[in-house]
Image (cartoon, helix red, strand yellow):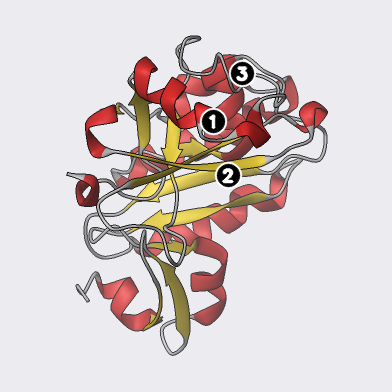
Amino acid sequence: MAEAYRRHDLLDVEPGAWGAVLAARPDLAEAPHVAAWVEDGRPVILRRSHPGEAPGIVPVGLPLPPRDGKRRIGLTLPPEAVRPRRPLDLSDTRHACPPAWSETVEAAIALGERLGLTPRPFGSLLWQSLTGLPYLSDRSDLDLLWPIAGAVPPALLDGLAAIEARAPMRLDGELLLANGGGVNWRELDTAGPRGTVLVKHRDRLALREAAAIFAGDPE
């Protein structure tokens, strides 16, 4: 079912379906890497639905590396054309990290271990790890997803701020909530328990009381 997938899910695509969808997109004929993307064993990622897209389809995307224009390509696929791929944990991406990132990455992994959480990469680090193509640069952020099953651990936001204060890059990312929504950790930290925050879902954006997010209350 297309509705079972959530933002940031990695999906493998059936090669025949990939060829069919590209045949309907002549604008992608000259785009680097796209034609062989699936044949080369690379996944796509579930993105937010755009207004007007048909219900029941699976909205996916892939970014091209900066040297190839950093274009974000959005596609739609039938549910039977995709299957889920196990997400990468941050610890799976050590091999792709620049040496200057090592201390920060290890600190984020250790923070997760202390709190019973498993950070996951997205953005440039994810795609360089998955594809071997050069996505990371001196200006790249370290983008992390933090899946949270219930209440936000009190030490998480303070821990992320402390790691960023020592890091050579900007530390960005989202807390992934149990209902599939995502909230930027920095915005939640700034809002505090009395504020409101923007929660991104696959099919909508919603403003929520930050106190409810901290408490792990369902929508």
Along the line of sight, which residue is nearer the eye, 4 or 157? Answer: 4
**Distance from label 3 to label 2 (Cα)?**
14 Å
Residue at position x 70%, y 28% from top? 135
Residue at position x 31%, y 49% from top? 6
Quick check: 217 left or right of 31? left
Residue 129's quadrant in the figure?
Answer: top right
Q: Which amino acid does label 1 sit on?
A: Leu
Per the image, label 1 sits on a secondary structure element best described as: helix
Residue at position x 26%, y 74% from top? 215
Question: Is label 2 or label 1 in front?
Answer: 1
Query: Residue 143, labelled with which disc?
Result: 2
Indicate the quadrant containing the C terminus: top left, top right, bottom left or bottom right: bottom left
Along the line of sight, which residue is nearer the eye, 62 or 194? Answer: 62
Compared to residue 185, the image places residue 160 above or below, namely above
Q: Mark 3 points at which residue?
A: 96
Which of marks 3 and 1 precedes in the sequence? Answer: 3
Which of marks 2 and 3 precedes in the sequence? Answer: 3
Q: Position of residue 44 (x, y in %)?
A: 45, 31
Along the line of sight, which residue is nearer the eye, 6 or 72? Answer: 72
Q: Which amino acid does label 2 sit on?
A: Asp
Residue 217's quadrant in the figure?
Answer: bottom left
Residue at position x 61%, y 14% from top? 132
Per the image, label 3 sits on a secondary structure element best described as: helix
Q: Position of residue 69 (x, y in %)?
A: 79, 35
Look at the numbered discs 2 and 1 and tell me whether their residues touch, using CB distance below 8 Å: yes
Compared to residue 158, the image places residue 26 above or below, namely above
Along the line of sight, which residue is nearer the eye, 68 or 161? Answer: 68
Quick check: 107 left or right of 31? left
Which of marks 1 and 2 precedes in the sequence? Answer: 1
Per the image, label 2 sits on a secondary structure element best described as: strand
**Distance from label 2 to label 1 (Cα)?**
9 Å
Q: Mark 1 points at which residue?
A: 126
